[in-house]
Image (cartoon, grey):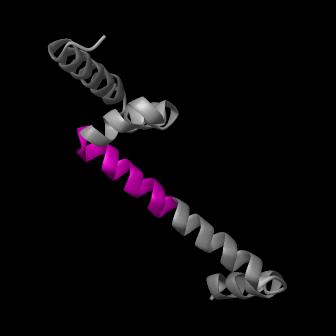
Amino acid sequence: MVLYQVWQTIKAHHLKRPGLYTFAACFDVTALAGGYWVWKQLRHNEENRLYCYENYPRILGVYYWGLNVLSFGERLGDKQQDYDIGKWVYEDVQDGKN
């Protein structure tokens, strides 16, 4: 009963601009879905991480930071970054690149 009354009060107050709130809600859902999609692509595909390393290093930095935050002290982002850079440098040396 109390929740219903609170919801009706909020609903009556915010119905003055329903289009704005609909847009904001759609934007939030789209941003979360897009962020999850990018996270999934980087998490499961090393080639995507290499592409981001070469073209969008800030996005990859945020990805590694997020891994560190979500690993609760295990520093998985740092471990993943060390592994990725080590492997890419090793492959460059084997291929004769500088």
Percent position of residue 44, x then y: 24, 46
Query: Image check: 18 left or right of 63?
Result: right
Q: Main secondary structure of the magenta part?
A: helix
In the image, 83 versus 24, the foreground residue is: 83
Query: Image check: 36 left or right of 21?
Result: left
Residue 43 seen in the figure? yes
In the image, 62 versus 91, the foreground residue is: 91
Percent position of residue 34, x then y: 47, 59
Vertical comparison of 65 with 23: above or below: above
Query: Image check: 58 left or right of 68?
Result: right
73 within the magenta span: no
Q: Quadrant of residue 53?
A: top left
Percent position of residue 46, x then y: 25, 38
Residue 64 seen in the figure? no
Vertical comparison of 56 with 30: above or below: above
Percent position of residue 47, x then y: 26, 39
Where's the N terminus, which quadrant? bottom right
Q: Quadrant of residue 7?
A: bottom right
In the image, 88 versus 10, the foreground residue is: 88
Q: Residue at x 32, y 33 (%)?
A: 50
Q: Residue at x 34, y 22 (%)?
A: 78
41 within the magenta span: yes
Q: Residue at x 71, y 81 (%)?
A: 6
Q: Residue at x 79, y 88 (%)?
A: 12
Where's the C terminus, which quadrant? top left
Q: Residue furthest left?
A: 94
Query: Image check: 25 left or right of 71?
Result: right
The number of discs equals: 0
Q: Residue furthest front?
A: 96
Q: Quadrant of residue 71?
A: top left
- Range shown magenta: 32-46
